[in-house]
Image: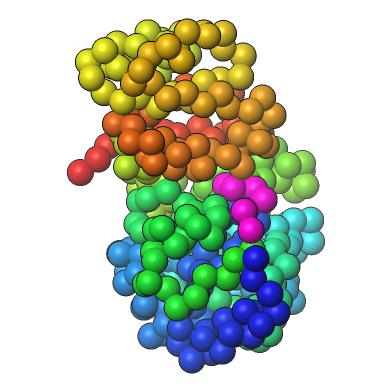
Amino acid sequence: MSDEHDIDRCVSLLACGGVVAIPTETVYGLAADASDEQAVLKVFAIKQRPLNHPLIVHLGDAGWLGDWTCDIPESARILAQAFWPGPLTLVLNRHPGVLPVVTGGQDSVAVRVPDHALTLRLIRALGRPVVAPSANRFTRLSPTSATDVREELGAAVDFVLDGGPCRLGLESTIIDLRAGTAKLLRPGAIPAERIEDTLHEPLVRGESAARVPGQHPLHYSPSAGVSVIPLEDLYSRAVSLSREGLRVGVLLPPDITCTDLSSEVRIVSIKVPAAIEDYASSLYRFLRSFDQQGCDIILASLPDAHGLGAALRDRLLRAAGPRA
Ligand code: TXA
Ligand code: MG
């Protein structure tokens, strides 16, 4: 785990245009000073992310909103009050001072206050926000530990601030508040129902007009192919693929009772935790472990869509998206 000395070092690195990996409660981020165009460009280069895909600006406090956004609606204040620091990203009108490179040239900007003690201290000591996309290469799995970041990005980053494993393990929920309504752009670590209860209105569901990588059909992907299949076919599909010679990873739902998968030599199975919060915080770790065990394909069925299940379904379906 990193300490006060490491935070000071990261502040110095960020202040002179460096890029450091930072822990958050969701996933690790790849941070640069949001006011430094060259540093932000380095983030795009390291991630190999197209320049027209906007980044989230991580604020030290909700009080910083006025310097980064305009026309702040009452709903933003209510949500910030209820969920910040925390895994909620708000899309608002961009303040004219925000660098176009941060927003992919759009007139909106995404902002959140992360809920991790080390990173909050870092941002507040820097005195300015950092951009922080997830610290993975474009379309790949988000890292949920400092080790994941080192394996994914290695020497490409100036420093990895180690804040331990991420508490939630799934990215923030993104809500667009610009059109006088609240629109869900990405299901995430705060279930949509909790936001609806707080706003006393239903969220609009649908695609954003922005070109967003979270909506790229292939995203959050391990190296192994992922196949989402009905629960009743999980067992037979795993057995037939392994008998074709493939090494198969299977995410077994907690209530499934097929005990004899372990006797199949080329099948690696992980029983997912019964509590959906535990499943959400472990999903990327499970997918990574299938890669590490050399699986060719990963089979999963979808959890129910309520609560955190919506975000899990979204990530599994995107991991199973079309490959180039
Ligand atoms: O939990 C998280 O949100 C993590 C941690 C590190 O904070 N960050 C993260 O960043 O997931 P990234 O870049 O991997 O995903 C950010 C998502 C993308 O889908 C991006 O397109 C969307 O936010 N986004 C950023 N700015 C936007 C904007 N102005 N309008 C619509 N979507 C935006
Ligand atoms: Mg990402």
Up-down relation of residue 106 to residue 239 (above or below): below
x and y percent of residue 157 in the render?
Answer: 42, 73
x and y percent of residue 47 in the render?
Answer: 36, 65
Q: Nearer the viewer, residue 110 or 162?
A: 162
x and y percent of residue 139 in the render?
Answer: 35, 51
Q: Quadrant of residue 213?
A: bottom left
Is residue 300 found left or right of 51 in the rendered image? Answer: right
Q: Quadrant of residue 277?
A: top right
Specify whether residue 307 is painted magenta: no
Up-down relation of residue 2 to residue 262 (above or below): below
**Magenta stretch: dominant secondary structure:** loop
From this viewpoint, is residue 75 visible? no
Q: Nearer the viewer, residue 289 or 181?
A: 289
From this viewpoint, is residue 9 visible? yes
- Residue drawn at 70 percent across, 79 percent down: 4
Q: Which residues are magenta?
A: 164-170
Instruction: Please name the colour scheme applied to the rendered image.
Output: rainbow
Q: Nearer the viewer, residue 269 or 207?
A: 269
Q: Quadrant of residue 74?
A: bottom right
Is residue 322 found left or right of 36 in the rendered image? Answer: left
- Residue drawn at 26 percent across, 23 percent down: 246
For the image shown, how many numbered marks are present on the structure? 0
Specify whether residue 166 is painted magenta: yes
Q: Quadrant of the N terminus?
A: bottom right
- Residue drawn at 53 percent across, 38 percent down: 283
Q: Nearer the viewer, residue 24 or 173?
A: 24
x and y percent of residue 324 in the render?
Answer: 20, 44
- Residue drawn at 51 percent across, 26 percent down: 270
Is residue 13 found left or right of 246 in the rendered image? Answer: right
